[in-house]
Amino acid sequence: MRIGRAIAGGIQARVVVVTDDDGFEKSARATFGASAQIGLDVIKGRLSGRDRIDVEGANVIVADVDAADEAELQALERLVQHIGNWPPVVVVTQNFDESVARRLMQMRVTDFLVKPVPPVELVQTCARVAKKPAGVEAAEAQIFTFLPAVGGAGVTTLAVQTAMLLLNSDPRGKTATCLVDLDFQHGACADYLDIEPRLNLGEIEPRPERLDRQLLQVMMSQHQSGLAVVAAPNRPAEMRSFDPDVVTRLLDLVSSHFDYVVFDMPRTWFSWTDSVLLGSNKLFIVSETTVPGLRHAKQLVEAIGERLGDGPRPQVLINRFEQKLFSPGLRRADIEQAIGDAFAATIPNHYGLVREAIDRGVPLDEIKPGNKITMQLKKLIFPQDGAGMAKQSAGEGRKFKLSLARSQG
């Protein structure tokens, strides 16, 4: 999520300067104060002496850092990690050598200047980096959402396996992938992966502004495979409806820091459900091979079409499908006739394999490489490459950011 606010009056850009140097502060005020189009906020003090920096609405952050002080460099690193790829950070330092340059490059600061900084150079640098690259929005995550049509359809199994496929979709290494369990009452993602759920929305709700990248890291679980998981402890006896702004803020933050995000949705429709569905690149409705299951899937497709209009087109997956010769059960042709154009695929039934994977907390491929469930999911997730190794550019096809999607509802 890109945190921003309207800029007052005729101000077209906001520069935040953090400095403990009286001389540099005076120079910055004189430099930027001459323009009515630039708003300047000076935060006086050392970067290492502050827990948080208000970057809301900023176009550029100028951080005056003592590069000889390890505490200052660590504080700078935390700041860069917290804000992600926007707004850009320009570092100003007195101490500079090859090791400092390497450290700043590793932090991925946007640019750095060495004191004394000529005013014209400071203005030109800020003006250059403040132009948001055309690819910034394209860096938003690809979002895959799994929504159950009936209870017990196996949504969590498909969501977990999809997240694992996306995690390993690039032959050059792991991709940044996050699995988010949005069933805050009966979620099972953490149990399926044998990890501890850490998300505490009750702690965030009173002060949603506290939710930033650092807090997200604290409330995020990590699977041994490298998959990040956002999941809350089960509360089966509590039916809570969290503030949609809190949930949307959480999901925007996640989508801003990962290449791929997979949502495991609850069957209950909440006030924030529209936003999640609208922000999805691929929306899968999961059902089972029964007449009631097919009816519910069809009804859900129609309801989503009515509510979301031009939003993502839902695709129906029929899980645990078996078709035997001379069997009186439902056949694929029956499913196609019942669901219509929204029918996407059947997922083979392999109960023993799925049960073993859940009990061991590992992906299906670790137990049986090239199994039929994995191969079918690859065809759905990577339609342009049946092998599943062609990585789509992040953000391709996105119509809404989650925060914007909510405003549409």
Image (spheres, grey):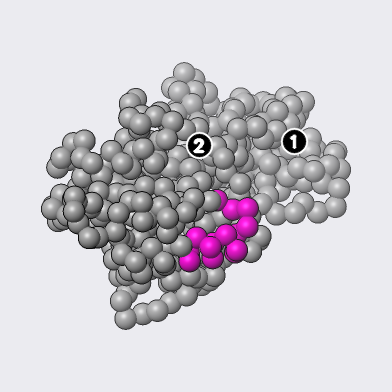
Question: Which image quadrant for residue 367?
Answer: top left
Q: Is residue 50 visible in this depiction of the protein?
A: no
Q: Which residue in the structure is indicated by mark 1?
A: 27
Task: Tell which residue pokes out farthest to the bottom in this image.
Answer: 237
Tell me where residue 134 appears, x and y as whole percent: 65, 32
Asked whether, in this view, residue 261 is left or right of residue 361, the answer is right
Task: Indicate the amino acid at tag 2.
Answer: Ala
Q: Residue at x 38, y 63 (%)?
A: 294
In percent of width and height, residue 176 lies at 39, 39
**In the image, which residues are magenta?**
299-312
Give the x, y percent position of residue 114. 61, 25
Task: Mark 2 and mark 1 in contact? Answer it, CB < 8 Å.
Answer: no
Element at label 2: loop
Which residue does the image show at 57% across and 59% down from the upper left?
305
Q: Is residue 306 magenta?
A: yes
Amino acid under label 1? Ser
Q: Is residue 4 above or below residue 296?
A: above
First in residue order: circle 2 vs circle 1:
1
Dot 2 surroundings within 10 Å: few (below 14), some, or many (20 or more)?
some
Question: Seen in the image, is 263 located left or right of residue 125?
Answer: left
- Quadrant for the C terminus, please: bottom right
Residue indicated by mark 2: 394
Residue at the image point whose x is 68% and y is 41% from the top: 59
Viewer-side residue, 352 vs 404: 352
